[in-house]
Image: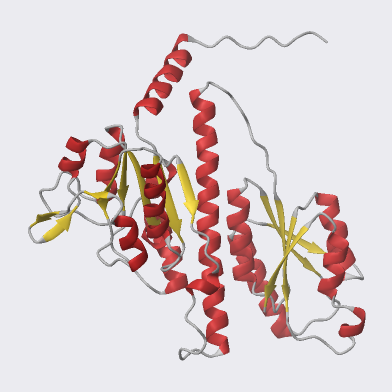
């Protein structure tokens, strides 16, 4: 077999590579601790990272911290140099000029979404951070996903809490590292004894799980963009094909909207395909048919491939189709209520999981 001779780069391509490398080396590095809910400990993680770097000999200062601090964060702050905030028209803001003059190796900045008062060098604190990075100062920061502009509406639908000050998603995409402060949802929940009944606790847990998924997908997206930037800096051409094939199995009673939305987000994240499938039943009521039609309409609105399957055994039909199409994830709904005889023979979900083998099965309660 003849050897493949690599294509010689043009002068323009070589110039772009050199410029990208110089910009990357000159610019400070940005690390962001990303939280999906209040109370996960992102500010503590940010300060603790600064403490560790300081103890390793790096020149670290604190540029801005949230006004309310805990005993744990106060203990960390006592070990670091803090650049005092300055007062502008009665508003405490980060002293950008003082930090630039001090020019530390690393600056810790909390409250990325804060707006600066009129007359400041920049309109928002995240723009102050951008200026520090351009000056060659590395920044460690933290932010909650509800303050990311492009995610604000989606998070608000889950939490029913709105915010006005935000950070653009492009700023997070420019980060060199994003770390999800992945505290278990139980740590963020109000205890059931504090006036919440079981249904309210379950609802809160579901909301936190959805927020956590958004944060994890965002962090993974940043990793993808870092890889793309690395390939660009080094003049490497790479193409990626669809790796994930997600199949959402719906029924008239399934929580189709949540299942399809989760499937869509995962498909977009992994550059994959989304299929919504329904196994036909010989006789269904008019109400069930109307509910099924609504669910199928949701699937079409999500630009999913819609498949109407036919087979005597729904589980075998789903598994046969999944193997034929190379499905990697199956989303199904499941009711916690089971018949007495299913305790002996197993539920259809049990059969599906046993037969899926290397196909991941994700279960949505309904």
The location of residue 302, given as percent across then percent down, is: 59, 59
Please indicate whether residue 287 sits to the left or right of residue 161 in the image.
right
Front-lying residue, 297 or 202: 202
**61 w.r.t. 166: above or below:** above
Please indicate whether residue 270 sits to the left or right of residue 107 in the image.
right
The type of colouring in the image is secondary structure
The location of residue 331, given as percent across then percent down, is: 71, 64
Q: Quadrant of residue 300?
A: bottom right
**196 w.r.t. 305: above or below:** below
Q: Quadrant of residue 37?
A: bottom left
Front-lying residue, 99 or 342: 99
Whether residue 256 is visible, yes or no, is: yes
**Residue at (31% x, 36% y) in the render:** 105
Please indicate whether residue 8 sits to the left or right of residue 358 in the image.
left
Front-lying residue, 51 or 158: 51
**208 w.r.t. 43: above or below:** below
**Residue at (69% x, 84% y) in the render:** 287
The location of residue 291, given as percent across then percent down, is: 67, 78
């Amino acid at each position: 077999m003849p050897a493949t001779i690599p294509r010689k780069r043009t002068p323009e391509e070589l110039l772009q590579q050199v410029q990208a490398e110089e910009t990357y080396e000159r610019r400070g590095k940005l690390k962001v601790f990303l939280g999906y809910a209040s109370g996960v400990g992102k500010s503590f993680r940010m300060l603790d990272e600064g403490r560790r770097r300081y103890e390793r000999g790096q020149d670290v200062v604190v540029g801005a911290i949230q006004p309310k601090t805990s005993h744990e964060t106060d203990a960390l702050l006592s070990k670091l140099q803090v650049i005092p905030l300055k007062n502008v028209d009665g508003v405490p803001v980060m002293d950008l000029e003082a930090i630039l003059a001090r020019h530390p190796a690393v600056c810790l900045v909390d409250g990325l979404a804060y707006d600066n008062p009129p007359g400041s060098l920049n309109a928002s604190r995240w723009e102050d951070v951008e200026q520090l990075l351009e000056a060659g100062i590395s920044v460690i920061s933290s932010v909650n996903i509800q303050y990311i502009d492009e995610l604000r509406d989606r998070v608000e639908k889950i939490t029913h809490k709105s915010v006005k000050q935000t950070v653009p998603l492009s700023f997070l995409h420019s980060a060199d590292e994003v770390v999800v402060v992945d505290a278990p949802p139980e740590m963020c929940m109000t205890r059931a004894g504090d006036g919440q009944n079981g249904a309210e606790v379950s609802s809160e847990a579901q909301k936190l799980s959805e927020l956590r998924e958004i944060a994890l997908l965002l962090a993974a997206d940043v990793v993808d963009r870092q890889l793309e930037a690395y390939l660009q800096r080094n003049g490497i051409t790479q193409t990626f094909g669809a790796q994930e094939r997600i199949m959402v199995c719906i029924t008239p009673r399934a929580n189709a909207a949540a299942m399809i939305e989760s499937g869509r987000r995962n498909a977009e994240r992994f550059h994959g395909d989304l299929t919504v499938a329904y196994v036909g039943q010989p006789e269904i009521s008019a109400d069930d048919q109307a509910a099924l039609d609504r669910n199928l309409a949701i699937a079409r609105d999500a630009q999913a491939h819609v498949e109407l399957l036919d087979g005597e055994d729904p589980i075998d039909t789903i598994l046969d189709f999944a193997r034929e199409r190379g499905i990697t994830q199956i989303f199904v709904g499941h009711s916690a209520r089971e018949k007495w005889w299913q305790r002996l023979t197993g539920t259809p979900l049990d059969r599906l999981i046993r037969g899926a083998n290397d196909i991941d099965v994700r279960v949505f309660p309904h």
